[in-house]
Image (cartoon, rainbow, N blue to C red):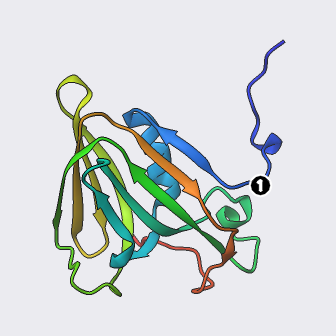
């Protein structure tokens, strides 16, 4: 008999997820919501057609972070990479200051023809990074152990 996986069956381990369609990307977007990163940690490798960000994401998947039962909230460093990127544009993003810290609010995919499309990363303060892609392929991979969130708080978005 086959049964669905249950949340309780999961173990605390680094995330390594791939998104190949808009639904998958929605999951990654939820996991990186409110991630922060300095301008110096964004890279576009034109030759490899890869755009990547080393970010510090809030561990939304941790039940203690969701309920506030834990006294210390956690973040983890992760790489968010997009493959098959043919063009990168930004608006409201000052890349001249490598110490400028950005906060990622959302990721959306606008489909085009034959699997191509545009990925938009929306940043706090009205910044947007647009990635034109031949196909949707995104990877999220934790690269450090979780650490106590420096703010000591969970991110919040007042209505």
* Quadrant (top left/top right/bottom left/bottom right) for the C terminus: bottom left
In the displayed structure, would residue 138 be above or below residue 154? above
Name the spot of residue 136 as percent of width and height, x first.
34, 37
| Left or right: where 12 falls relative to 157 | right
Task: Identify which residue is drawn at 35% across, 68% down.
Answer: 42
Q: How crowded is mark 1: few (under 14 residues within 10 Å), some or many (20 or more)?
A: few
Which residue is nearer to you in this view: 107 or 18? 18
Instruction: Give the residue pinned by disc 1.
Output: 12
| Left or right: where 105 falls relative to 70 | left
| Left or right: where 5 falls relative to 140 | right
- In the picture, residue 144 is in which quadrant? bottom right
In the displayed structure, would residue 26 be above or below residue 57? above
Tell me the element at label 1: loop
Name the spot of residue 107 as percent of width and height, x first.
35, 53
- In the picture, residue 115 is in which quadrant? top left
Task: Identify which residue is drawn at 59% across, 86% down.
Answer: 150
Name the spot of residue 121 as percent of width and height, x first.
30, 58
Name the spot of residue 1 as percent of width and height, x first.
84, 12
Task: Identify which residue is drawn at 46% across, 61% down.
Answer: 33
In the orientation shown, which residue stands out farthest toward the front?
Answer: 47
In the displayed structure, would residue 22 be above or below residue 91? above
- Count all numbered tags in the image, as a single digit: 1
């Amino acid at each position: 008999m086959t049964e669905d996986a249950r949340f309780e069956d999961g173990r605390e381990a680094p995330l390594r997820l791939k998104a190949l369609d808009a639904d998958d990307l929605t999951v990654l977007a939820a996991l990186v919501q409110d991630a922060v990163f300095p301008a110096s940690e964004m890279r576009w490798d034109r030759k490899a057609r890869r755009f990547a960000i080393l970010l510090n994401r809030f561990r939304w998947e941790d039940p203690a972070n969701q309920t506030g039962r834990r006294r210390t909230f956690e973040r983890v460093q992760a790489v968010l990479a997009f493959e098959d990127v043919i063009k990168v544009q930004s608006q409201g993003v000052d890349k001249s200051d490598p110490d400028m810290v950005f906060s990622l609010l959302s990721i959306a995919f606008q489909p085009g023809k034959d699997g191509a499309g545009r990925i938009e990363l929306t940043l706090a303060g009205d910044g947007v990074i647009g990635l034109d892609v031949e196909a949707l392929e995104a990877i999220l991979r934790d690269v450090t152990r979780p650490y106590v969130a420096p703010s000591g708080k969970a991110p919040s978005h007042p209505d």
